[in-house]
């Protein structure tokens, strides 16, 4: 579970719920507009279907899961693991890493791929090319997730404006009859549509898209660190040199502990 995401969701819901209760005093139905729901949420979903292929739309639940749950290893853990592998390869030879392959595959499949190619004695240039292609493919997959929420963030308020205009037109159309109830209903449609679009963009789609972008950057950096570690092991570098290369990717606060353990 991503604790930061959970805290953000709870704070947002708490603040919105408190303000809403103070405004309606428990009569929550006043915030509901069927026309606004169809206009904003239905319109935003239609935009996503029009702008993205079906294969990407099917991954939406995976994007949400990635927002709330994060299984990737930290740079500190990856640096420690690679340092141990480098030390073992230096003492016992690269083939000795075969016994660690199964364990590494469960923890970090990307590192396991590089480790497998290292054990098989592949050319370092070919290993680097293969792993960089995998990083590039992962980056493109992550872009699709952010793109989905960027579309909702961009067009949600636009559809809210459409709902507002429709409500205003309905209100003006009832001026002649002088029906206060009809005019009030249309005004509620206009205001609710604006509210739905604003909340959808700024409290849902925007933060999720930004978190996915941050996670993608972290994972790309982590995989680049792993790639450099694999190449260092293949080059027969001293384990301390390998760890020093890894430390370039680790926050300053965590470097001292890793250097002491190296």
Image (spheres, helix red, strand yellow):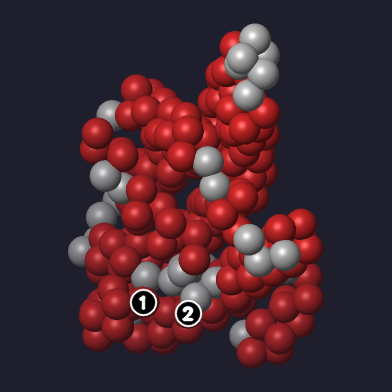
Question: With 175 as the anchor, is 93 left or right in this view?
Answer: left
Name the residue nearer the viewer: 100 or 105: 105
Q: CA distance from mark 1 to mark 2?
A: 10 Å
Based on the displayed image, in which of its 4 quarters is residue 235 positioned? bottom left
Please say if 183 is above or below 91. Answer: above
Which mark sits nearer the N-terminus, 1 or 2?
A: 2
Please name the residue that numbered disc 1 is placed on: 107
Q: Residue furthest left?
A: 120
Task: State the SS at label 2.
Answer: helix
Q: Name the residue: 50% across, 60% down.
A: 67
Please say if 158 is above or below 60. Answer: above
Q: Which numbered disc, 1 or 2, marks the residue closer to the eye?
A: 1
Please name the residue that numbered disc 2 is placed on: 81
Q: Residue furthest bottom?
A: 261
Q: Name the residue: 66% across, 66% down.
A: 26
Dot 2, crowdedness within 10 Å: few (<14), some or many (≥20)? some
**Total numbered badges shown on the rendered structure:** 2
Based on the displayed image, in which of its 4 quarters is residue 66 positioned? bottom left
Question: With 72 as the anchor, is 208 left or right in this view?
Answer: right
Q: Is residue 115 visible?
A: no
Please say if 16 is above or below 83. Answer: above
**Of the numbered discs in the image, which one, if any, rests on residue 148?**
none
Name the residue nearer the viewer: 51 or 80: 51
Q: Is residue 67 visible?
A: yes
Please state the horizontal and vertical placement of residue 162, each as a whole percent of the image. Answer: 56, 20
């Amino acid at each position: 579970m991503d604790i930061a995401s959970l805290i953000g969701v709870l704070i947002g819901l708490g603040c919105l719920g408190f303000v809403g209760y103070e405004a309606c005093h428990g009569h929550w139905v006043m915030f509901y507009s069927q026309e606004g729901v169809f206009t904003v949420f239905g319109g935003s979903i239609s935009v996503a279907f029009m702008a993205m292929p079906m294969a990407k739309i099917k991954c939406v639940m995976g994007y949400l899961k990635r927002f709330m749950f994060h299984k990737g290893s930290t740079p500190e853990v990856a640096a420690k693991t690679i340092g141990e592998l480098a030390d073992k390869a230096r003492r016992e030879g690269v083939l000795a890493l075969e016994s660690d392959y199964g364990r590494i595959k469960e923890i970090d499949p990307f590192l396991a791929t590089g480790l497998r190619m290292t054990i098989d004695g592949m050319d370092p240039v070919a290993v680097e090319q293969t792993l960089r292609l995998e990083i590039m493919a992962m980056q493109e997959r992550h872009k699709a997730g952010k793109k989905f929420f960027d579309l909702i963030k961009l067009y949600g308020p636009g559809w809210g404006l459409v709902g507002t205009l429709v409500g205003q037109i309905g209100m003006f159309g009832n001026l002649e009859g002088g029906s206060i109830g009809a005019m009030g209903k249309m005004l509620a449609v206009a205001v609710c549509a604006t509210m739905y679009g604003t909340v959808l963009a700024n409290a849902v789609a925007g933060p999720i898209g930004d978190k996915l972008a941050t996670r993608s950057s972290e994972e790309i950096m982590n995989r680049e660190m792993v790639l450099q570690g694999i190449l260092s092991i293949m080059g027969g570098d001293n384990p301390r040199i390998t760890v020093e290369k890894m430390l370039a990717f680790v926050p300053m606060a965590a470097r001292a502990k890793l250097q002491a353990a190296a």
